[in-house]
Image: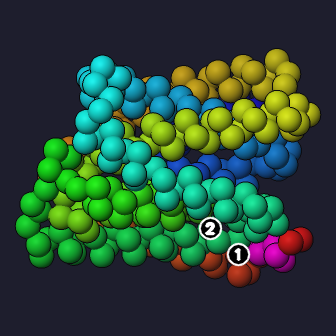
Amino acid sequence: MVYLIALLLGLVQGLCEFLPVSSSGHLFLIEKLTQGAVGEDHFGMFFTVMLHVATLVTVCVVYREQLWGILKHPIQPLTLHLIVATLPTVVFALILKKFDKLDAWLEQGNLLGVSFLLTAAFLTVSELMCRRRRAKKSIDTMRWTDALAIGGMQAIGVLPGVSRSGSTIAGALGMRIDRKSAANFSFLLSVPAILGSFVLELYKLVKEPSSVNFNLEFGVALILAMLVAAISGYFAIRFMIRLITNKGLLGFAIYTGALGIVVLILQITKTWGFGFTPFGG
């Protein structure tokens, strides 16, 4: 059962990391619904972060030419834009870490339903704006102020249930960047975001080795889940780029909106183990 759930978590991470539906929110849902089968907190935050690292490998494979270009010529507009867009997330994450009780309260999924609804709102508004206004910019012609606005949207994506890719793509479309460039910049922006999460989790592991229960079962489950996440993530990136270019985001807005309503109802009625934890509790 542990391995089956691990494979499911890997598949969900690989698909949802690049679809604008929130991978962290879906991972939380699966862990919540399956904790009776494997035990509460069986996988934990380290497991989740390592799944994100697996999808980071996928990004590096798909965007190897752009990333290699940055490594060869670091002084270029794209590098500046990625740095600028990352800063709001770093600031917001550091502020959140200063408030331990608030951070823990959010990680317990208390805003999960609201966050899914927020993702739906971002996608709907950006899609409507995009259809009314012609895109004028690409990655090559965007300004640092555009990158800062996209970074601000990514900072909101730190909240569990708010899609990082959805919020950044929505921000890019709102700044009149063309659809394909919006998707590409969002996925490239995931590289420093995921690396930052990995470094923070690695620091926590070094500081508190007991925070992760390493054993053979955990190790095998993690490797299987990471492989599935990397493979499914590759196809998800390709699919998402074509979809956002040719179709748009309203379908995902409807899905996350409906999911947000369902989760909110479950939390209010305290059904299937869902509910609201008192702040600081």
- Compared across the picture, whether 120 is left or right of 162 comes to left
Give the mark nearer the N terminus: 1 vs 2: 2
Marks 1,2: beta carbons within 8 A: yes
- Compared across the picture, whether 269 is left or right of 166 comes to right
Q: Quadrant of the N terminus?
A: top right
Q: Residue most toward the bottom?
A: 268
The residue sitting at 86% across, 44% down in the picture is: 39
Mark 1: few, some, or many residues within 10 Å (few <14, many ≥20)? many
Magenta stretch in the rendered image: 274-279
Res. 223 image quadrant: top right
The residue sitting at 53% across, 29% down in the picture is: 54
Secondary structure, mark 1, is helix
Residue bearing mark 1 = 267
Residue bearing mark 2 = 112
- Pinpoint residue 62: horizontal percent, then vertical percent: 32, 27
Secondary structure, mark 2, is helix
Magenta-colored stretch includes residue 277: yes
Magenta-colored stretch includes residue 8: no
Amino acid identity at mark 1: Gln
Main structural element of the magenta stretch: helix, strand or loop? Answer: loop
Mark 2: few, some, or many residues within 10 Å (few <14, many ≥20)? many
Res. 79 image quadrant: top left
User: With respect to residue 85, does 53 lie above or below?
Assistant: above
